[in-house]
Image (tube, rainbow, N blue to C red):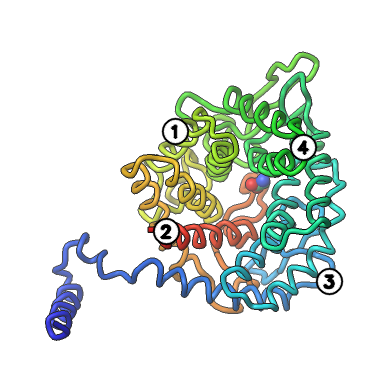
Amino acid sequence: MWQIQKTIGCSLLLALLSGALPAQQAQKVQPDLLTVIDSALQKAVLQYKYLGTQLPADVLPKTYYPLTKKFETSKSSWWTSGFYPGSLLYLYEYAKDPALLAEEKRIEKIIEKEQFNKGTHDLGFMMFCSFGAANRLAPSKEYEQILLNSAKSLSTRFNPTAGVIKSWDHGDWKYPVIIDNMMNLELLFWATQFSGDSSFYKIAVTHANNTIKNHYRPNNSSWHVVDYDISDGHVISKKTHQGYADNSAWARGQAWGLYGYVVMYRCTKDPTYLAHAKKIAAFIMQHPTTPEDKIPFWDYDTPEIPATYRDASAAAITASALLELTKYVDPTSGNSYTGFAEKVIRSLSSPTYTALYRQNGGFILKHSTGHLPGNSEVDVPLTYADYYYIEAMLRYKALKAKK
Ligand code: GLY
């Protein structure tokens, strides 16, 4: 038997070398994705331990500019402050390395004051990716209070006339809501479940319903920014901030929407949200500009495609969302979602996107785009790309462990 396998192995290798193997069969000889993921997670643990050594006290990692070798950090009030601790906790869950947990505890002290920050809609990202995960792993009264206070702070930004949570306090907008805001609602569901106060739940559902109504286009892509007039709740304008054009589909915005409506379905079991998530998934997966490796360009509609930048962060968010969505649908749809996510994870785990140890400022992934029109964070690593990539890999492992 062993001899037969060995012979088949040799002929496959010969066929591959001679280029005689059909593409479908060639794919079969790729390493098993679970093996790829284990190797990627082990590398991620080492890389993040190195990242920790690069970090000055009291700040969070943000990005790294490979050309100038500039390592950029942020204060706790910046919207990405929850991703580094969140990634540390995911990696700790995987590796059980106490150094990762100790570093996360150090960071908690830096960001906990943000529970009272009423000047941002990003408290879900900041507090739920960090303290939400910490509380899931080791529930405590202290964590619960921090999370509840964060949900209360976020709720102060809800306007009942417009029925939405305000995103930004800056700019020339009146009451701007960005599609990204869908990601902050999970914190509100947690708060209702924990406290029994249904007002958080109602805010989340109202915001999500108005976002379906006002942010989504007939082709199931989303505008980035919708500005409301809170005197009567009417929409003043629909624009972009980080996308190519007002009517284009900014890649990360599509990913935030997909992930957000998958969470909405998980938390409410309302089939409207499932149907909406499926439509967004179809937009992303079937888009003609989605490249073969499934890492999208930074905007699906930029005319510069293919001579423009990718956004690994959008791909990571999408993969993670699809791996949850797959649990809520029929097996055929589920297989297509899982298959797409598998391709994304494989691509991100390749040397094209995964940095070498101690390179890339200590971040895991290369080639994300933060804000191209603002000429900021273009073709760089980003903490949230790493976070959702790690999450996607852990979700994949959990999915396969169940089968
Ligand atoms: N939430 C901000 C961004 O995705 O760039």
The residue tagged 3 is 57
190 lies above or below 166: below
Judged by depth in the image, the label closer to the viewer, 4 or 1, is 1
Question: What is the quadrant of residue 359 in the picture?
Answer: bottom right
Q: Check disc 1 and give the amino acid type.
A: Lys
| Residue drawn at (52%, 55%) of the image | 316
Q: Secondary structure at mark 1?
A: helix
Number of the label disc, if any, that sits on residue 168: 4
Q: Check disc 2 and give the amino acid type.
A: Lys
Q: Check disc 3 and give the amino acid type.
A: Ala
Please provide percent x and percent y for residue 38.
47, 72
Please provide percent x and percent y for residue 84.
69, 63
Are circles 1 and 3 on residues that touch, CB within 8 Å? no
Judged by depth in the image, the label closer to the viewer, 2 or 4, is 2
**Marks 4 and 3, Cα distance to the nearest angstrom?**
28 Å
Please provide percent x and percent y for residue 328.
44, 41
Question: What is the quadrant of residue 1 in the picture?
Answer: bottom left
The residue tagged 2 is 402
> Any atom of ligand 1 within 8 Å of the CB at mark 1?
no
Q: Is residue 178 left or right of residue 172?
A: left
